[in-house]
Image (cartoon, helix red, strand yellow):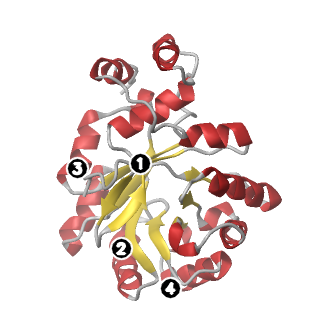
């Protein structure tokens, strides 16, 4: 489930192709969210990441309707942990806000309290089987929590979306996901990165790109989907423009070496 489909996407269970570079919408609200998503879609993004907690599902959905055919866009949204036990109601509200009959990926945003962990996963599987989401996963889960879901249900989440950056690179954690057939998806790629780091600046100069683009390309070299966020038009475009160059094995190793794990 980590085989690349066309070099720009990763295949999830059910032959669901998730684009490797998505557009994050955390902290974007109202007209700012709408305009940023429209810019992203115009720039070529076909993967949008939102969440009930973000309060912008309606703006994301409106931007999609005003820009492209819904079927061209991979949409992720997430269940707040406090809504455990209200899965059907929450997905219905999300679909109504987004203006769509389904989402492509529905995630449990954070692990709910221990007693609700397995019940929530069972409810997610039921929602998936109803056709309201094409595939299901989790966010911010540790390996032990992933194993609890697998042991209880016999089914691994398609995705675990966690904070990831060169400084957080953890080969053992990445390998643990792949051993379980789970795609590790990274968020906040720049928040934990020093974009002025000499390693990144040297590699960026060698390729004629920005250090932010190097960080994103590093994710792709590891086969890790990533969802950068920006509301600046130039950066929105640049963050998607990471398929025209590749990092050498030595460059990837040098960036891996920035890990503080």
Q: Position of residue 147 (x, y in %)?
A: 23, 59
Q: Earlier in the sequence, mark 3 or mark 1?
A: 3
User: Which image quadrant is residue 232 in?
Assistant: top right
Tag 2's secondary structure? Answer: helix
Q: Looking at the image, is 235 positioned above or below residue 203?
A: below
Residue at which label 3 appears: 178
Image disc number at residue 121: 2
Q: Is residue 256 above or below residue 235?
A: above
- Name the residue carrying label 4: 88
Gap between marks 4 and 3 measured at Cα: 30 Å
- Alpha carbons under labels 2 and 3: distance apart: 20 Å
Which SS class for mark 4? helix
62 above or below 164? below
In the rendered image, residue 165, in percent from the top left (x then y), is placed at 45, 34
**Residue pointed to by mark 1:** 225
From the viewer's side, name the closer residue of 81 and 45.
45
Callout 3: SS: helix
Callout in the foreground (2, 1): 1
- Quadrant of the rendered structure where residue 199 is? top left
Callout in the foreground (4, 3): 3
The structure residue drawn at horizontal position 52% and vertical position 52%, both measured from the top left corner, is: 22
Q: Quadrant of the C terminus?
A: top left
Label 2 neighbour load within 10 Å: few <14, some 14-19, many 20+:
many
User: How many angstroms separate mark 2 from mark 4 (CA)?
Assistant: 12 Å
Residue at the far front: name it: 244
């Amino acid at each position: 489930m980590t085989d690349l489909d066309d070099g720009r996407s990763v295949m999830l269970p059910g032959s669901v192709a998730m684009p490797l570079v998505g557009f994050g919408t955390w902290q974007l609200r109202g007209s700012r969210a709408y305009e940023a998503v429209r810019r992203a879609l115009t720039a070529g993004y076909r993967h949008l990441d939102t969440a009930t907690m973000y309060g912008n599902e309606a703006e994301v959905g409106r931007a999609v309707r005003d820009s492209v055919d819904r079927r061209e866009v991979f949409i992720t949204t997430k269940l707040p942990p406090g809504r455990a036990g209200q899965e059907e109601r929450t997905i219905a509200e999300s679909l109504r806000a987004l203006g769509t009959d389904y989402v492509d990926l529905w995630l449990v945003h954070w692990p709910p309290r221990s007693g609700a962990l397995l019940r929530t996963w069972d409810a997610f599987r039921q929602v998936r089987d109803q056709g309201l989401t094409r595939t299901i996963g989790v966010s911010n889960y540790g390996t032990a929590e992933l194993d609890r879901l697998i042991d209880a249900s016999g089914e691994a989440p398609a995705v675990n979306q966690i904070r990831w950056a060169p400084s957080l690179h953890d080969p053992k954690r990445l390998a643990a996901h792949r051993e379980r057939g789970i795609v590790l998806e990274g968020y906040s790629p720049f928040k934990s990165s020093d974009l002025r780091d000499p390693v990144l600046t040297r590699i960026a100069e060698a390729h004629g790109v920005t250090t932010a683009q190097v960080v994103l390309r590093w994710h792709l070299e590891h086969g890790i989907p990533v969802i950068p966020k920006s509301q600046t038009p130039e950066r929105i475009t640049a963050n998607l423009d990471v398929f025209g160059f590749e990092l050498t094995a030595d460059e990837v190793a040098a960036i891996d070496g920035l890990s503080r794990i």
